[in-house]
């Protein structure tokens, strides 16, 4: 797996406590047989902007899309994170806007952590800002992935038990959760709306519009087998018939009865519930695919 540490130190690496802890975390990832790169932001020639700028920072940002996890590292300056981490927030705003407009979160399958070096207050404030930012961009934040190092100087840092243990926790938990996300692939099933988008289910799929277009409709269906077994179709649990089904020749003895008396609210509610359960059910895949194709044929594609 691949992890990236964005180092927001304000001093040269050879003088930086933050960089020293970054190196410890990098070595911890490598000991676990994973790749880890440190990108020191102060060494780049980049512009502070919320736009997509072609400078030294852009290719480093693009690396995140191929990484499994990202860590923001910063010293404490007057109780807050450094200007380089703030620049990361600002430059990644274009990704947030793209995700909102396209209803797709590109970081759903990736983990996020923080590394803060310094003394005095500021640890929780910085973690909170970074975690809020990362969550809104779709990252997953595993427990114990917030390193806090109060030690000063390379010798003291490497010998500080608290720092060492937190570095171990961060590396192990990030890799563990990254593997879980890789296997579960939440990007496939999770909703991709952002916090400032009203993505109500009824707005996403208008089942009544599909009904009026004769793409997806409620019918009562019974067959010779069902009648022989004494099974009667229920108007409250209709069969979902698509335009594709209607083009197919019926079997001898099968009966399809439309349900014009089923109201718009009842149909919308019924389909909302059915869709939420069926779209991830392998047994319902054929029907789900039929519905999607019928909606597309009717000019009302389901995203």
Image: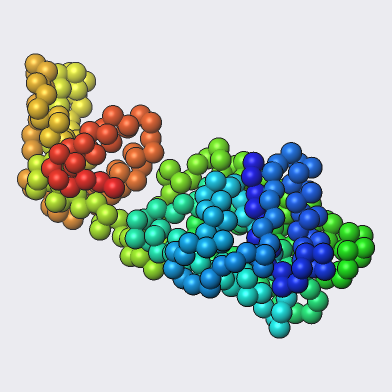
The residue drawn where x is 11% and y is 24% is 248
Residue 79 image point, x, y percent:
70, 81
Residue 135 shows up from this direction: no
In front of the other: 228 or 297: 297
Is 291 placed above or below 198 here?
above
Q: Which colour scheme is used?
A: rainbow
Residue at the extreme top of the image, as rendered: 252
Asked which quadrant contains residue 156, the reply is: bottom right
Residue lying at 19% horizontally and 22% vertically, measured from the top left: 226
Report whether residue 55 is seen.
yes
* Residue 100 position within the rendered picture, expressed as x and y whole percent measured from the top left: 38, 61
Q: Residue at x 75, y 72 (%)?
A: 11
Tell me if residue 69 comes above or below residue 79 in the rendering: above
Give the residue displayed 75% in from the left and 51% down from the top.
26
Q: In this view, does 271 lie above or below 82?
A: above
**Number of callouts in the render?**
0
Q: Nearer the viewer, residue 183 or 8?
A: 8
Residue 193 located left or right of residue 83: left
* Residue farthest to the bottom, as pictured: 78
Q: Could you say which is closer to the camera, residue 6 or residue 202?
A: 6
Measuring from the top left, give residue 216's x and y in whole percent.
16, 41
x and y, in percent, of residue 96 in the image = 44, 63
Looking at the image, residue 12 sits to the left or right of residue 47; the answer is right
**In the visual, does 57 lie left or right of 150?**
left
Quarter in which the N terminus is drawn: top right
Q: Find residue 250 and report its image quarter.
A: top left
């Amino acid at each position: 797996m691949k992890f990236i540490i964005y180092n927001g130190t304000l001093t040269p690496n050879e003088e930086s406590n933050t960089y020293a802890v970054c190196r410890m975390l990098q070595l911890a990832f490598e000991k676990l047989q994973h790749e880890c790169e440190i990108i020191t932001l102060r060494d780049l020639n980049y512009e502070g902007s919320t736009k997509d700028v072609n400078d030294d920072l852009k290719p480093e940002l693009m690396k995140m899309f191929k990484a499994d996890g990202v860590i923001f590292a910063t010293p404490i300056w007057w109780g807050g994170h450094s200007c380089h981490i703030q620049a990361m927030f600002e430059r990644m705003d274009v990704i947030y806007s793209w995700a909102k407009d396209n209803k797709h979160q590109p970081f759903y399958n990736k983990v996020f952590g923080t590394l803060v070096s310094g003394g005095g207050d500021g640890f929780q404030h910085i973690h909170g800002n970074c975690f809020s930012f990362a969550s809104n961009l779709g990252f997953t934040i595993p427990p114990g992935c917030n390193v806090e190092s109060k030690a000063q100087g390379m010798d003291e840092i490497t010998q500080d038990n608290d720092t060492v243990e937190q570095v171990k926790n961060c590396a192990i938990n990030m890799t563990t959760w990254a593997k879980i996300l890789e296997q579960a692939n939440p990007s496939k099933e999770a909703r991709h709306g952002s916090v400032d988008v009203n993505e109500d289910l009824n707005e996403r799929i208008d089942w009544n519009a599909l009904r009026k277009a004769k793409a997806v409709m409620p019918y009562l269906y019974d067959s010779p087998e069902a009648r022989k077994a004494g099974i009667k179709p229920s108007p409250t649990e209709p069969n979902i018939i698509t335009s594709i089904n209607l083009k197919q020749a019926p079997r001898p003895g099968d009966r399809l009865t439309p349900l014009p008396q089923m109201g718009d609210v009842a149909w919308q509610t019924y389909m909302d519930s059915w869709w939420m359960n069926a779209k991830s059910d392998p047994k319902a895949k054929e029907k789900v695919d039929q519905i999607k194709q019928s909606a597309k044929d009717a000019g009302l594609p389901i995203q």
